[in-house]
Amino acid sequence: MKSLSSTGRPSLLRGLALALAATASSTLAGAFPALAAETELTLGMTIEPTGLDPTIAAPVAIGQVTWQNIFEGLVTIDRNGKVQPQLARSWEISPDGLTYTFKLEDGVKFHDGEVFDSTVAKASLERARGADSVNPQKRYFASIDTIGTPDPLTLILKLKAPAGSLLYWLGWPSSSIVGTKSAADDKTTPVGTGPFRFVSWAKGDKVELAANPDYWNEAVEVKLDKVTFRFIADPQAQAAALKSGDVDAFPEFGAPELVESFKDDEKLATVIGNTELKVVAGMNNARKPFDDKRVRQALMMAIDRSVIVDGAWSGYGTPIGSHYTPNDRGYVDLTATNAYDPEKAKALLAEAGYPDGFTFTIKTPQMAYAPRSAQVMQAMFAEIGVTMNIEPTEFPAKWVQDVFKGTDYDMTIVAHAEPMDIDIYARDPYYFNYKNPAFNDVLAKIEATADTAEQDRLYGEAQKILAEDVPALYLFVMPKLGIWNKKLKGLWENEPIPSNVLTEVYWEE
């Protein structure tokens, strides 16, 4: 969805936004070579994963290579965001919501020959929730009290308290089932039950997969024999690779300012879909002056989100008023809360004791949207007397060390990719250093009920608390800018969960 800017904004800001958006849009030429073999695919990604085991590290690029390709879960999430059976063919939930009984698929083997059964599933879940676990979503397994394996094809989870989102969480990449023999080495040589096997990883360049000839799910017809993930960070290089045919698809193209250059290309399709990528400028709520809600509200009021979308992502994006996307159940449009109002922002700053503004630093990862957004924000903050210095910060290593783990920052900006992750504001610790018992109570009520209508109402309450309290500046949802060969079919147009699912991908003859 392309966002339209409002009119009547300061020409200085509009000019800055347009200047940032119009970078390097020169015509890219090159003959399109003959298609690769109809059973091979080269798929481009901007960020190379730090490892290949999604159950031990958080970066979404890991799952974008491995989830549903190499690794599978008890359940999965389909292209519409719905939970579907996978290694568990069915399940029953007790009336009190405390017992989940899964019936498992028979005849499933890992790529190394290990047989999948209830004991393997139990070992995988115990690894994810254990005391030494480094699973990025370890907290989602905290509700599990005991894991039973009465027979090889039955798995029973007994919970300490109802967890209304448990099935959904079990579909995430971090909940992938790993083998008992191979788990320790999955970071570099992943072994799963999925439709593709790992072949090789040339760091800095590519990961290669091959179709699994012994794939257990006979209902799935895999039509690709070989898949190569190519890692190309530079947007101009991405565009050139697409134009030349060196890459068949970029499901998440990294240069929105170049998208228009593909729209008249006879061989390439431009597909704009939805994502869960919420671009937010997080503040350190434990550090002055961000510990004062009036200051946070003032900074939010200083921002015209539509101008941010223009400057950061060439007009592609949807402004948001809370940590929630229009795709998510229970979404409430809260962009009118603490809406753009520089004069009111100045008054709030004066009331908070900063009539002459203040100075702070924002740490920006190198992804294009971050420095671009920061430059537009810098000009907007200057209009209310606030000086923001921009400090580039290498991502992920330096950013994770300084911001995410060390909370040594004033403000940062990053796209949060996990779906329905509004609960991050209740985590303690978390890099926002935000604490609000009322917000935590609402989230607890969501998990305590299985009534979806009640859950949606409560999600609305949670969104309203964040929009009013502003622990982070809510900017926009990034679209999925997909560009791929027109003969390539089956890639996901939308992204309910960060992924590159290849199961249904094929070349049209």
Image (spheres, rainbow, N blue to C red):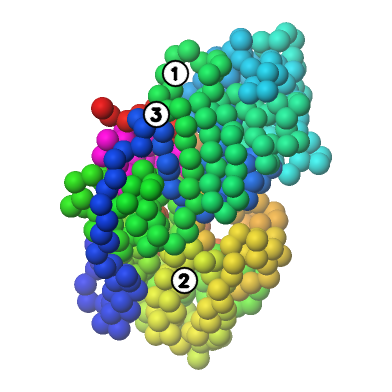
Whether residue 498 is in magenta: the answer is yes
Residue 3 as seen in the image, left or right of residue 432: left
Mark 1 lies on residue: 220
Q: Nearer the viewer, residue 25 or 493?
A: 25
Q: Is residue 60 above or below residue 151?
A: below
- The kind of secondary structure the magenta stretch mainly shows is loop
Name the mark nearer the viewer: 1 or 2.
Answer: 1
The answer to which image quadrant residue 222 occupies is: top left
- Which residue, given by chain and number where applicable, does mark 3 sit on? 39
C-alpha distance separating marks 1 and 3: 16 Å
Q: Which residue is mark 2?
A: 371
Closer to viewer: mark 1 or mark 3: 3
Percent coordinates x, y for residue 436 in the rendering: 62, 57
Q: Amino acid at mark 3?
A: Thr
Residues at marks 2 and 3, CA–CA distance in whole angstroms: 39 Å
Above or below, 310 relative to 16: above
Label 1 is placed on what type of residue? Val
> Which residue reaches farthest bottom?
356
Q: Nearer the viewer, residue 38 or 60?
A: 38
List x then y, in percent, for residue 142.
71, 36
Q: What kind of residue is marked 2?
A: Pro
Helix, strand or loop under label 3 = loop
Residue segment shown in magenta: 483-500
